[in-house]
Each structure stands twice: as structure tokens, then as C-alpha cells.
């Protein structure tokens, strides 16, 4: 089971890097909860809201390079140590290492929790992108307002 769960997580991350929203959603449980743990934001609930939330960034990113340093699974929990490099359509870049936990239920990702240094990553973002991100609230993604 652990090998299947690792394969599912890697499939989801490939789909994200390729902006393949249909494949990404096919990896997500109907009751998925995705959350950036260092923020106070309650995250996104449900596959459509997860994609809506991710699209805020991805609509402005030319490509994302994903480097998986380590992946480990224990039953229905998969952990990734990975680096993401974002290349914005305007040429700026941001690169940061994340630790991600996925909880699998019924063969799909049920919980997705990203852990990262918010200040270090966000300090690399162009000012215009921070304005775009600030224009959205948790209510936009099925979270609390």
C-alpha cells in the first residue's frame, strides 16, 4: 500500500508542475483539505477549491520545477521533502524547500499539508504578485472568511 500511496503523491505533484488540473483532481479525495500550515488561512476544501486556490499562483507562473529530495510512506501517510522553483511569466523566479504531508483515504489524497518558511519564500515574490494574492480571501476556496 505504501508504494501505491507514494506513486499517487508523485503523480499529483507531476500534474501540478504540468498545470494538468484534471489529473491533479483525479488524485484528490472529494473531501480533500489542502492547507499551507505556516499561514492562518484555513486552506481549501474539495478538489475544485484546491485547483481554484492553486490557480491564483499558477495563472502567473510560466512553469514550476519540482525536485523531490526524499519521499517516505508509512501506511496511509506520505511525506515529501522537495524544492519548488517558480518561474513567473514576467521572468522573476522564487525557489524554496517544502515538507509536505499527504494523508491517503480510499486511494486518494484526503489531507495535504505544506510546511515551509513563509517569510523566506514570500520575500522572493514580485510585488505585483503579492497584490494578486492579497486580493483573495479564504471564502474564495470554501474556507472561513
Image: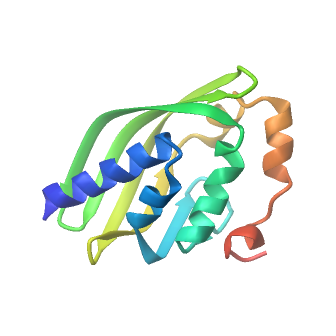
Image quadrant holding the C terminus, namely bottom right
Residue under the point 43% across and 48% down: 15
Residue under the point 33% across and 50% down: 11
Observer able to see residue 95: yes
> What is the x, y in percent for residue 126?
78, 29
| Residue 8 left/right relative to 65 | left
| Residue 137 left/right relative to 99 | right
> What is the x, y in percent for residue 9?
32, 54
Residue under the point 66% across and 61% down: 52
Instruction: Determine which quarter of the picture holds residue 124.
Output: top right
> What is the x, y in percent for residue 114?
49, 52
From the viewer's side, name the closer residue of 45 and 23.
23
**How many numbered marks are there?**
0
Q: How is the image coloured?
A: rainbow
84 up-or-down from 112: above or below: above
| Residue 102 left/right relative to 96 | left
Observer able to see residue 43: no
Amino acid at each position: 500500500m505504501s508504494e501505491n500511496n507514494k506513486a499517487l503523491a508523485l503523480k499529483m505533484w507531476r500534474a501540478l508542475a504540468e498545470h494538468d488540473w484534471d489529473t491533479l483532481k483525479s488524485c484528490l479525495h472529494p473531501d480533500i483539505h489542502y492547507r499551507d500550515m505556516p499561514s492562518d488561512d484555513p486552506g481549501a476544501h474539495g478538489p475544485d477549491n484546491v485547483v481554484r486556490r492553486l490557480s491564483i499562483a499558477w495563472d502567473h507562473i510560466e512553469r514550476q520545477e519540482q525536485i523531490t529530495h526524499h519521499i517516505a510512506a508509512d501506511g496511509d501517510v506520505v511525506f515529501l521533502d522537495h524544492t519548488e522553483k517558480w518561474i513567473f511569466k514576467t521572468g522573476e523566479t522564487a525557489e524554496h524547500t517544502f515538507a509536505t504531508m499527504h494523508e491517503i483515504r480510499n486511494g486518494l489524497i484526503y489531507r495535504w499539508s505544506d510546511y515551509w518558511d513563509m517569510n523566506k519564500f514570500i520575500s522572493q515574490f514580485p510585488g505585483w504578485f503579492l497584490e494578486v494574492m492579497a486580493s483573495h480571501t479564504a471564502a474564495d476556496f470554501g474556507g472561513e472568511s
